[in-house]
Image (cartoon, rainbow, N blue to C red):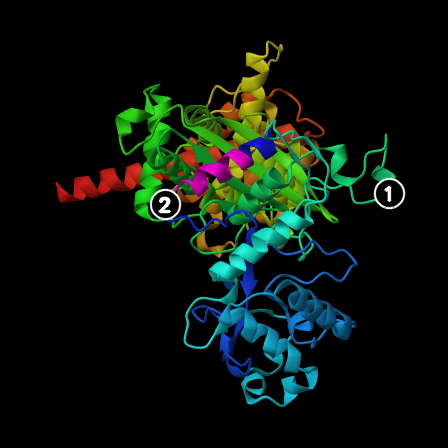
Amino acid sequence: MILTALYEYYQRLLDTPDTDIPRPGYSREKIGYAIELDAQGHVTDVIDLHHQSGKNPQPRQLSVPQPEKRTVAVKPNFLWDKTSYVLGVSASSKRCAQEHEAFKRMHQHTLATSDDAGLKALLAFLERWTPQQFEENPHFVEQGENMLDANLVFRLAGESRFLHDRPTARALWSQQQAASTDSPAGLCLVTGEQAPLARLHPAIKGVNGAQSSGASIVSFNLDAFTSYGKQQGENAPVSVQAAFAYTTVLNHLLRREASNQQRMQIGDTTVVFWAQAAKPAEAEAAEAVLAALFGTGETDEQATQRLHQVLQQVRQMRPLKELGEHLRDGTRIFVLGLAPNASRLSIRFWETGSLAMFAKRLADHYQDLALVPTAWRREPTPRYLALQTAPQYAGKPKEEDVSPLLAGELARAILTGSRYPRSVLAAIVMRFRADGNISPLRVALCKGVLARNARLGKEQGKSTDKGEPPMSLDTNNTEPGYLLGRLFSTLENVQRAALGSQINATIRDRYYGAASATPASIFPVLLRNTQSHLSKLRKDKAGLAVKLEKELGQIIDLLGPHFPRSLGIEAQGQFAIGYYHQTQARFARNEEQDATESEGEIA
């Protein structure tokens, strides 16, 4: 299914005007330099092809003849390669002489009968070149050691196209590919047609954490995989054409370019997505919605507004086509999550469905997280949500502190509409206790985990006495964790009211972790201390003291005669929600009071 979807996407891109997807037999590779030759094979210039716009210069992506898949064998590429093959010099390779000789011998054999001026110039260059010239030729000296191990191409002086783009070179490359196809024919699992089968599939590059030389989704390159007389690719027959197509389009999706909005990183999972529709514009519109969700595009106001409109349309159960601009409910969406696994790639998740289905799941996701007042100004991306599980002692949280597995599973739950990983709740509760940062988005995640568990449990017919946590303060909620969170917030409010600006640290700074985990051992102590605070308030602000005592009494009456000895993870999540709701309700009342007093003064 995955390979078929990628193959079909490649065919659609080939039919799309102005696409830069490589044609069969070619691949987009990072090229650092171009060697310019005159007709006699003399080096007239060495051109740096790196993009200089960013802080670190990046090699240029060029469509070149497909590279050989190297394991331990010496295999030169056609008309391009790294410096150890092309020039016989390297900063890392210990077999430069062997690699350069293989590059030279292969091109002398392949280009021997060619009358093309550019290819004849390359043969002349290889005939007279020696590795010692790298330190003597002024054109190479000017580039220095930065050139070592970079990929190189050639071009003829006075022309803008490279040698591998010349018609004669393209024809020779096609002939070479046809001649090298010695694989037996068989039925391709992707296309369903009889065709030569690929023994080894081209490498997939761009997955974070995988080998820089590339990794594989399909690979049988060990003797242990030989069974029933089948070797290498015969175990999972995929034609040479289909193997090239799916790996090429996947490398296209995985390219690390600022313009690529179809790739993102969530923990150790590299996520790519694409859309299929009757019209290219409809596919692009759907991809723009996903880019806004994942945060892969520019986070401008227009993208944020478009995502918000889509979610609102789904909540109102209205068709997306009413929004115009090519959005269609039936547009097919594909989302693929890849994780490194030595020389191979693991499929972390694979989700397909209509745009309407994904939009419904996204709307449910944000509804599960919803709080009043809202916890965000723009819908948070899965990557940003996962970041909330990282420590926040000082400054911004760091992505390396997020559990890679947790981040990937969180994204999967959002896309599939399944339960959020329980580890999210455990991680957030642990962070509350460690750094004391009870931020709105962290509380929203707690609420989301509990709300989705309750909702899905009800939909699946499982009997449960636990309902979904409220979005705002619910004075009728009798969950012990929720009530204890409300009580803790009220006790903190009494402390602040009594001590005012004299306070250096509140009970939240000192007792939050213990109060949320072992209430029976902490709350009696806090209540005794609160009596002294209330006594002070009765002298200074009698009306406020009465109000706070009444609030405390109402919460304690709902709790019952005894405090729980301990709270589980879910109850600790409820504790955070109750604390947040009670605190936010107090802020709202204070704002309303300030507004009323201001209106009275104006009147």
Residues 204 and 569: in front is: 204
**Residue found at the far left of this picture:** 603
Q: Quadrant of the N terminus?
A: top right
Magenta span: chief secondary structure: helix
Tell me the quarter of the picture where residue 119 sits: bottom right
Asked if the residue under mark 2 is in contact with the one under mark 1, i.e. CB atoms within 8 Å, the reply is: no
Vertical placement of residue 498 versus 411, above or below? below
Q: Which mark is residue 480?
A: none
Report the label total: 2
Q: Amino acid under label 2?
A: Pro
Q: CA distance from mark 1 to mark 2?
A: 44 Å
* Left or right position of 224 against 311: right
The first of marks 1 and 2 along the sequence is 2
Vertical placement of residue 315 versus 502, above or below? above
Residues 175 and 47: in front is: 175
Question: Is residue 580 something that shows in the picture?
Answer: yes
Q: Secondary structure at mark 1?
A: helix
Q: Please state the extent of the stretch shown in magenta in the rendering.
A: 6-16
Q: Quadrant of the C terminus?
A: top left
Q: Secondary structure at mark 2?
A: loop
Q: Which x, y percent locates residue 129?
A: 65, 81
Residues 95 and 267: in front is: 95
Q: Which residue is mark 1?
A: 223
Residue in the image at 58% along x and 87% along y: 141
Tell me the quarter of the picture where residue 424 sits: top right
Q: Which residue is mark 2?
A: 17
Q: Bin the neighbour count of mark 2 within 10 Å (Cα to Cα): few under 14, some 14-19, many 20 and up.
A: few
Residues 403 and 548: in front is: 403
Vertical placement of residue 119 versus 545, above or below? below
Q: Amino acid under label 1?
A: Asp
Q: Which x, y percent locates residue 553?
A: 51, 26
Residue in the image at 60% along x and 78% along y: 125
